[in-house]
Structures are given as C-alpha cells and as structure tokens.
Image (tube, coloured by chain):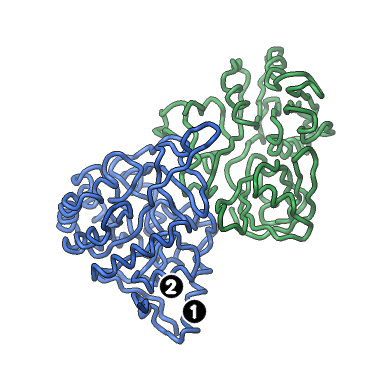
Amino acid sequence: MKCLTSGIVVDNHEIAENIYKAVISVPNIANQCFPGQFVNIYFPDSVRIFPRPFSIAGVDNDAILLVYKVVGSQTTVMSHWKPGDNVKILGPLGNSFGYSGQINQPVLLAGGVGAAPLMFLRDRLSQDGIKPLFFLGARTKSQLPFLSDSKSELILSTDDGSIGSNGLITDELAEYLQKKDNPVSVFGCGPDLMMKTLKSMPFSKNVSVYVSLEKTMACGLGLCQGCIVKNSSDSAGKHYSLVCKDGPVFNLKDIKFDD
Amino acid sequence: MIDLRINLGNNLVLSNPVMTASGTFGYGDELAEILDINQFGGIVTKSLSLEPRIGNPSPRIVETASGMINSIGLANIGLEAFLKQKKPFLSELTCKVIVNIAARTEEEFGTVIRELDHEDWIAGYEINVSCPNVKEGGIAFGTDPRVLERLIGVLRKTTKRFLIVKLSPNVTDIAAMAKIVQNNGADAVSLINTVYGAAIDIYTRKPKINTIIGGLSGPAIKPIALANVIKVREAVEIPIIGIGGISCGEDVIEFMLAGASAVQLGTINFTNPCVVSEILEFLTVYMKQQKLTTISDLIGRLIK
C-alpha cells in the first residue's frame, strides 16, 4: 500500500562522478517494496513544483537506498542531504520486475545510473542464491556507479574504453545472447538511446526483455496522465500506457518508442 | 462550532468549500490509499466523453516556473467503462461527486448527461467548454458567445441536476461568458481552466509540449484566476467556483473573499497530494482567529 511519509537520511555520499548513494530510513516503504518500484521525493520548492521519481536501488532493514545522478537543481539539493535530514517521500510506486518464480536465467543490463533498480533486483536474486550476469556500461570509467560486485558477474564497457570493452554494452549483451539457447530474461534500465537500441535488436524467441523506463512525471500516481509510452498494439484497446502506474517496468515487446 | 458548509443552491450542499479540479484527481480511486477522499466537499472527475479518448502524444507535460503546462487531450475511458469500472468506488463516497463532461458536439453532451441522469450517486455536472488542447469541442464551445448560449440552453433543458460551466480565461471578456451561462439557467460557473502557455527547448529548438501551445496551471496562474473571479463576481449572481493555482488554506480564503463560494484544487494534487487536510485545518484556525462561525459569510467580502 502506497504511503506518503517522512523519511530520515541515514547516509548520503558520492560513489562515482556525480553519482550518489543515499540511505533513507523509511520503514513503511522499505518493508513492502519490490525491485523495479520507485518513490517520489518532494522538495520545498515553490518554483520547481514537481516531485522527482527515483528507482529504489535496494533495501537495508528499515531503509531504502537511492542511487542518483546529479543533473539539476533538485538532485543538487539531494547531494547536500546530511544524516538526520527529513525527506518527504511517497511510495512504493509502480509495478516491479516481477522476477520471483521465473525459471528463466536472469541477465541484468544497465547504462550508468540506470543501474539503480537492477541493484535491488540483483540483491533479491542473491538472496535466492542466484548470481546473475550484470552488463553495465557508461561513457567513461568514472561514471560507472561501481566497478566490482560480489553479488553478480559484472561485464563492463565504456564508450572511451577506459575500463571494460570499448563500445556499447548492448553489443556485449547481443554477443552473449547469440551463444544462448536456454530461456533468458533480460532486465534493463538506461538512457533513452539504450532503450531504443534494445528495441531494435533482433532477440531470438528464448529471450524476454523487460525494461524500466523514465519519463517526466507530475504526480507518479496516474492522476496527470503525463508520462505516456506507446503500446506496440492497440489490441487491448489501449493506445498508451502510463509509465508511473502501468510501469515503470514493461515487456519490451509491448511498447514502442516512435512518438 | 465552525460551520464550513457551503450551500450552492439547487440541492447541492458541500460539507466544505474544497473540491478537486477535473483532470488532476483521476476518478478518485488512484489516491484512496493515501488519502481520505471524503475530506473534500466534493470531487470533480476527469473529463468524461461518450467514447474513450486516447489523448495526445508525448510530451504531454512540462514543469515551468511555479507551474506546469499540460496537453493531455482529454484522455479518458469513456462513458461505458466509467460506469462499469468507476461507479463502485465513486458511488460509495459520502462527499459530492460531480462528473466533468467534455464532448465534440451538443448531441454528445446531451447523450452523456441523459445516461448519467439515471445514476443517483452523481450530484451534478461540470461542462468543459474550456479545454485548450483538443481541436474539436473544448474551448471552441467556450469562446464563441452564441455557441455557448445555445449549448447551455440545451443542456439546461436536458437535466435538472446541478449544472456547472467551466470557463476559459483565454477570452477577451470572461464576465460576458459568465453572464451567458447565468442567463441560460446554469447553476454555477467554475473558473479558470488553464491559461495558454508554451515552452521551448533551446538546444533541440523543439516545443516542450506536443501541441506546441498547452495549458498553464499551478501557482503561476493564481493571480490571473483571482482577477477573473473578481471580474465575474461583479457580473453574475450565481455561485462561482474558483480554480487556479490554489495550494493552501490562505489561497482558499483569498478566492472566497474575491467572490468564490467554493474552490477546486488542481495542480497541487500532483505536488502535495494530501494537502486537503492541511487546508481544512487552516480554515478552522482562520475562522476562530477571525471570530467567525460560518465560512460562507466570507464569500465576496473583499473590502474595496
């Protein structure tokens, strides 16, 4: 059940260039959220009025973890959070990756700070004794949220070759999947371009792809109907889905990015 | 004992003057987990049309200084699905439920109202003649005096229920429009709908809204809304429902002093979804501090 509540910052520090990890004690949300879900953070700002949505990057007892990149004024405010600060927060919002019970081999794919929701999924897989492959790419080494990981088998790539292979992480994924014929579920999150690249890739029948999307949201609750993504067919009688309510996780075959 | 009740006439009494604005509150059910909906005097549902509408393409919203621009295009599930899916929740509410209706033609308005008139849980209708984001219907009804006159006349004959007409600020003389609404028998006017607004990405040189020009809402438009309420108050006697950037209890009082009998909360539902309890608490504190017992005594009591 969603709740609008007050969290307390436990820890907040930079883990990569402009990428921060915050730990927020908020039991009502931490105790009931699933990988893929997100929270809204509210700011006492009368000029920039929207709350900002963030994927939950993990749970640590009564706290949730957020991994965020400083890109604007609100994330700058967040980067100044100190332990003990109060944060107005709404969650958990949206659907989830819904992995539990799947027999497919899970493979994680992320671009930059898009790793956030997948870190949570990786934790839950780890609790189930699964150590997934984690394809993680960024422009350059300093923009990777982490460079090593005990809970996954990490495959890195960078646009400039400063660590891992030199090129796109989606190419690494494609090469890996070529050799697979068992059922595989890819869980991905990253910049729009990466999502579009994924959509254009010819996946074979044994591969299912689930992506977590980001869109400008005013409410995060399905009220404003602002955060639409186009459905790949109108068969369900619905032309658009809402990223906040129907998503943020979608089966890649159900959506398209051409609008 | 503080009396927050508002009697709007034609059998519509609100438990307090705070309502929700259409299109900012879904059908009420989305917020039920985090909020007691019955705290509102009334809720106004998302614009309903006879057939479902898919709405406009992306991008539909953009944040602007102290506000936002939207161009949703009246996306809604249509009359049949509304009655099937939303009635179970809405009909159980104790606050008043007003259904906002948008249509392309006079006939469509009439058909929707005749169908809804069978539903005893609906307290009234708000007629949307002011949506800036659709090509047909919407604002086309609300900017031409003769078209508006004819439409309201027909709708008044269609239903005895409480009839609100929601007006656009994007006209030369909103008071003239309000007079037409009054003269043709509607029970109240609500104002303002969104103000024409635009925003441009200077790097891509593209508009930040699919229709290029959309509707501006939020605290940025509050002074515009308040000025329009004052103008309309001077022109008509029927109740005014004030809308436009209302974000706190102080804003509610301001609109009531300007002449509004009730108000609707819009964009604030996105940015502070549980604000209604804060507002009601403020209203009680303010009344006590002003040594007043009946909130309706404040309506139009602006000292000029």
Q: Is residue B41 above or below residue A224?
A: below
Q: Secondary structure at mark 2?
A: helix
Say which of B30 and B294 sits in front: B294
Chain B drawn colour: blue
The residue carrying pointer 2 sits among few (fewer than 14), some (14 to 19) or many (20 or more) residues within 10 Å by Cα, namely many
Q: Is residue A8 above or below residue A145?
A: below
Q: Is residue B77 in sight in this rendering?
A: no
Q: Chain of mark 1?
A: B
In the image, residue B10 lies at what x, y percent? 24, 69
In the image, residue B216 lies at what x, y percent? 43, 50
State left or right for residue A183 relative to residue B174. right
Q: Quadrant of residue B134?
A: top left
The residue sitting at the bottom extreme is B291
Q: Quadrant of residue B91?
A: bottom left
State left or right for residue A113 relative to residue B48. right
The residue carrying pointer 1 sits among few (fewer than 14), some (14 to 19) or many (20 or more) residues within 10 Å by Cα, namely some
**Residue bearing the label numbered 2:** B253
Q: Secondary structure at mark 1?
A: helix
The chain shown in green is which? A
What number of labels is visible? 2
Q: Is residue A192 above or below residue A19?
A: above
Q: Quadrant of the C terminus of chain B?
A: bottom left
Q: Residue at x 52, y 58 (%)?
A: B273
In the image, residue B217 lies at what x, y percent? 44, 53
Q: Are marks 1 and 2 in contact (CB under 8 Å)?
A: yes
Say which of A18 and B263 sits in front: A18
What amino acid type is highlighted by mark number 2? Answer: Ile
**Residue bearing the label numbered 1:** B286
Say which of B288 and B6 sits in front: B288
Q: Residue at x 45, y 85 (%)?
A: B1
Q: Chain of mark 2?
A: B
- The answer for how far apart the CA atoms under marks 1 and 2 are is 9 Å
